[in-house]
Image (spheres, helix red, strand yellow):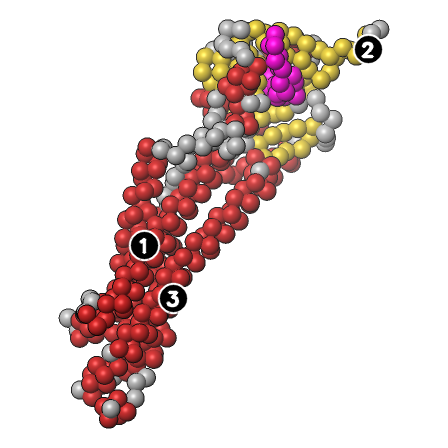
Amino acid sequence: MKFESFLALKYIKSKKTERFISFSSFISIAGIILGVAALIIVMGVMNGFDNELEQKIIGVNPHVFVKNFSGVFEYNPVFVKKIKKLSGVKYVYPLLTMQCIVSSDRFSSGGILNGVKIKSSGELKKYIKGETNGVVVGSELLKMIGLRVGDKIRITLPFGKVTPFGFAPLSFTAKITGIFKSGMYDYDTTFVYIPIKELWAKTEMTNKINTIAIILKDPYRAKQFSNTLVKYLKPGFYASNWIDLNSNFFSALKLEKLAMFVILMLVILVAAFNITSSLMMLAMEKVKDMAVLMAFGATKRNIKNIFLKQAAIIGAIGVLFGDFLGLLLSFLLSRYHFIKLPSSVYYINTIPVDIGFTYVAVISVSAFLLVILASLYPAKKAAGVDIVEVLRQ
C-alpha cells in the first residue's frame, strides 16, 4: 500500500488527542449516508408516481383522439378501418362520451358517460370486474350513490326535448353489470361505461359518435402519430393525444422532482462542508507530520493526495452504505406497502416505488464528487505548509 493511502486510513481512526476530529468524520459519513439514502428513496417514489400515473392514463384513456369541431358526427366504419391499417395502431373504436347525472333512489352524482364497445377498447377491460353487457360504474361512484352490481341506475343526460311544461332532459334506467376500478380516485368517481349500441338505442342517436379512439402499440409515440394522422383527416376533424392533454401535469411533476433532488442534495452538501472542517482541523493537528514527511522527500502532491484519499474513503463509505440503505428501504416500501395514501386526496392509494439504476448512479456520483470538491481546499492548505518554519519550531 502506498504511504498516501496508509496515512489516509490511519488518520480516519481515532486517537485520544484526536477524538473530536474522528467524531466529525463519523458525522460526515452519517450525513452522506442519510442524504444518499433519502435521495434514492424520494427519487424512487417520485419516479414511481410518474410511471404509475402514466400507466393509469394510458390504460384508461385512448392514446390518440379524432374529433370534429362540430361535436357529434356520423360513424364511418370504412374510415375507422383505414386508420387501423396505419403503422403502429393496435385498436381503433368509436366512442360517444358525454356528461351525465347518475342517480339511485336516494343519491345523485355527476359523471361522464362513455358509450363504447369495451371488448374492442384495448387495456380498459382489465380494470373492469363483472359483465360488460350493461352499465359499468366506477367503484367510488357506486359507493357515493349507494348502489351495487345488479341494481338499477338512472342516467340523466344534458339534452332532451322541449315540452309544454319546459325543457325535459333525456333520462333512462339500466342495470349495473360491472364495476370499474382503475385505482385513480378521479376516474373511479366519474366514469360510467355502457355499450355504444345500447346508448344509441336509448338516446335515438343511432350511428352518432363524437370521438374515434385509437390505441397504439407504443403509447409514447402518440404525439408523432397524431401529427401524421392529420393529413388523413377530412376538413372539420382534428387529432389530439394523451401527451399533449397531460403535458402541464407531467411538466409540473418533473419540475417537482428536480426541486426535490436539489433540496436533498443540500443534505449531502452540508455533510461535505463538515468534511471540509474536519480535514482542516486534521491538517492543523498534523502540520508537524506533514513537515517531517516533506523533509524525507514527500512532495506537495503527496501531501495533497493524503487528504484527498481520506475524503475519497469517507465519501465511498458514505455513498455505498447510503446506496444500500436507500435500496433496502425502497424494496421494503414497494414490497409491503406499509404506507397507505388516502385515495380521496391522491391519485393512487399506495406509494409506488420505481428505482432506476440511472438515478442511483447519478446520485452516487454527484455525492462522491461533492465530497472530493469539499476536500480540495484543506488538501491544498495542508500541502502549502512551510517546512522550514515548522521544523524550526
Question: Sequence-wise, which precedes: disc 2 or disc 1?
Answer: 1
Three-letter residue code for mark 1: Ile
Image mark count: 3
Q: Which residue is mark 3?
A: 273
Instruction: Give whichever of 55, 264 is nearer the camera.
Output: 264
Q: Which residue is mark 1?
A: 33
Tell me, yes or no, whether the highlighted magenta stretch contains residue 104.
Answer: yes
SS at mark 3?
A: helix
Q: Which residues are magenta?
A: 96-117
Coordinates of residue 332 in the picture (x, y in percent): 31, 38
Is residue 33 visible from the viewing direction of this image?
yes
Residue found at x 57% / y 32%: 64
Residue found at x 30% / y 88%: 386
Q: Nearer the viewer, mark 2 or mark 3?
A: 3
Residue found at x 24% / y 91%: 393
Res 72 → quadrant: top right
Q: Which residue is mark 2?
A: 166
Mark 2–mark 1 distance (CA, rounded to whole Å): 71 Å
Q: Residues within 10 Å of mark 3 (few under 14, many from 20)?
A: some
Mark 2–mark 3 distance (CA, rounded to whole Å): 76 Å
Three-letter residue code for mark 3: Phe
